[in-house]
Amino acid sequence: MGNKSELTFEEALNQLEEAVDNLEKGELTLANSLEEFELGVKLTKFCSDKLEQAQEKIEIIKEENGKVIIEDYNYQGEGVE
């Protein structure tokens, strides 16, 4: 993931896609394949964490009795780790 202090979700996703493409080509040495795999795992965790943070910020807007009520979204994933 490099030394970037603030990697964006989109950058991480692009890097993850590139790592997967490199692995799928099957042209890497074993050592390079392991490096790409390790990078992929780190990027997957990073993206997962970013998505979880975004889900925590989602607000549900409901209209009740002519009033707009904003509630925090509380994601309760089933079977997701």
Image (cartoon, rainbow, N blue to C red):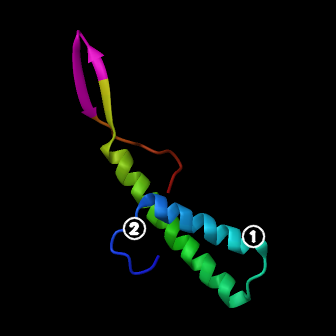
- The residue shown at (47%, 58%) is 10
Q: Is residue 77 left or right of residue 33?
A: left
Name the amino acid type tagged 2.
Leu
At 45% from the left and 65% from the top, the residue drawn is 46
Q: Say which of 36 and 18 sits in front.
A: 18
What is the x, y in percent for residue 2?
44, 80
Determine the CA span between mark 2 and mark 1.
Answer: 24 Å
Front residue of 22 and 69: 22
Label 2 sits on residue: 7
Mark 2, Cα crowd under 10 Å, few <14 / some 14-19 / many 20+, is: few
Q: Where is residue 13 drawn, in percent x and y?
A: 53, 61
Hey, which quadrant is residue 60 in on the image?
A: top left
Horizontal placement of 26 versus 64: left or right? right
Residue 58 as seen in the image, left or right of residue 20: left
> Circle 1 is placed at which residue position?
24
In the depicted view, which residue is nearer to us: 44 or 26?
26
* Residue drawn 28% across the image and 16% down it: 63
Whether 28 is drawn above or below 62: the answer is: below
In this view of the protein, which residue sits in the foreground, 48 or 78?
A: 48
Residue 73, relative to residue 20: is it above or below? above
Name, please, the residue furthest toward the right: 26
- Quick check: is 61 in the magenta stretch? no
Secondary structure of the residue carrying tag 1 is helix
Q: Which residues are magenta?
A: 62-71
